[in-house]
Image: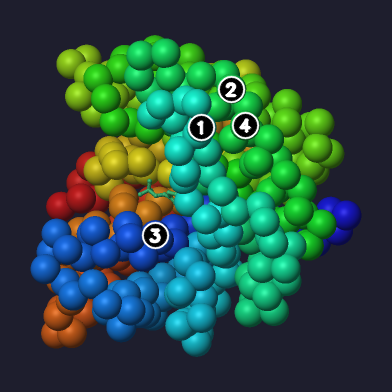
Amino acid sequence: MQTKKLVATVKALFADDKGLLAMDESTTSCNKRFAKLGIPETEEMRRQWRELIITTPKLSDSISGVILYDETIRQIKNHEGMILGIKVDLGLKAFEGHPNEKVTEGLDGLPERLKEYVAMGARFAKWRAAFEVGEGIPSQDCIEENARRLAEYAFICQQAGVVPIVEPEVLMDGDHTMERCRQVTGQVLKTVFAELKAKGVAVEGMILKPNMVVPGLACKTQESVEEVAYATVTLLMEMVPGDLGGIAFLSGGQSGQLAAARLNAMHVTFRDKLPWPLTFSFSRAIQYPALEIWSGKEEHTKAAQESLKRRADICQAATRGEYTPQMEK
Ligand code: 13P
């Protein structure tokens, strides 16, 4: 295994308190977001949006790497000094015999696909498993099946010299409490790291992309920013090996402001006690409100890029524990 190369890529991705920008929405997800804003759901419009993002002036001041989708890596000519990542899972499928649970697909032919992506410049990859929280779910069976696949994917990536981002997302939908999110996330992380270990994945050459420990979006009790930060970091310290390459959070449907404030609070509270670098790998919490501003209109490009740059810079400030609500004005 090319551990040295993997570690060097991880270090480059976390350098200068930068973070990642996820822009790897599948065609279906991207079209859904376009449809809400009346943007034509075409390959050309998706290309224009992704190009607008990548060519944002000085985006690389705060963004070290971008995660692309298969369609996009073939469309984008220049990546403006940011490291290229690629989503390699093929999405969620119903988990047989387990109503309302899903498993992620995409292991078939993965080594060959990776080879092609590496030739196109990709140095890291992403695979997302998603767990809905509900009555009796997620089941341990579902967690184990997804964890096995995540570990298999991570192993294949490392063999190819590609840094795997391992993303087991506990979804925010529902009215479950923060405590329930903490329990489920703990169970998921424990299983995922056991499978990674069993498979022989070098954790120093990978990145974990977890959810924050948050109450469900419809839960009546919404804990403070500091409580979320505390619950999240203490759980990660308990479940995640200290020699892990780093952690980059997904935003999962939190507003940009809240995601930044929570990440900031983690750094303020735990400053020198964090064993791994801790940053962001947001999609929605950076792409909004820029997507609304753009709305498919070329004349709005500059304003949309300014918004993107602003959100990315705010996230970097949060990674430094230097975020203030005044920055939102
Ligand atoms: P969000 O930040 O919008 O949750 O997206 C992150 C991501 O990459 C989901 O796979």
Residue identifier under label 1? 96
Q: Amino acid at mark 4?
A: Glu
Relative to 122, 289 lies left or right: left
- Helix, strand or loop at mark 4: helix
- Amino acid identity at mark 1: Glu
Residue at the far right in the pictured view: 1
Earlier in the chain: of badge 1 and badge 3, it is 3
Q: Nearer the viewer, mark 1 or mark 3?
A: 1
Could you say where residue 314 lies in the image, as x and y percent from the top left? 34, 53
Which kind of residue does numbered mark 3 sit on? Answer: Glu
- Label of residue 141 in the image: 2
Which circle, 2 or 3, is nearer the viewer? Answer: 2
Q: Residue visible at 53% across and 44% down?
A: 104
**Residue drawn at 60 percent across, 44 percent down:** 166
Residues at badges 2 and 4 in contact (C-beta under 8 Å)? yes
Q: Residue at x 14, y 80 (%)?
A: 297
- Report the front residue among 10 and 145: 145
Mark 1 secondary-structure assignment:
loop
Given contact means CB atoms under 8 Å apart, are the residues at marks 1 and 4 in contact?
Answer: no
Ligand 1 has an atom within 8 Å of the beta carbon of the residue at disc 2? no
Indicate the position of residue 142 as horizontal and vertical percent values.
55, 27
Q: Which residue is mark 4?
A: 145
Name the residue carrying label 3. Answer: 25
- The reply to whether the residue tagged 3 has its Cβ within 8 angstroms of ligand 1 is yes
Q: Looking at the image, is mark 1 or mark 2 earlier in the sequence?
A: 1
**Quadrant location of the N terminus in the rendered image:** bottom right
Residue ranking furthest to the front: 97
Task: Categorize mark 2 by other alpha carbons within 10 Å: few (<14), some (14-19), many (20+).
Answer: few
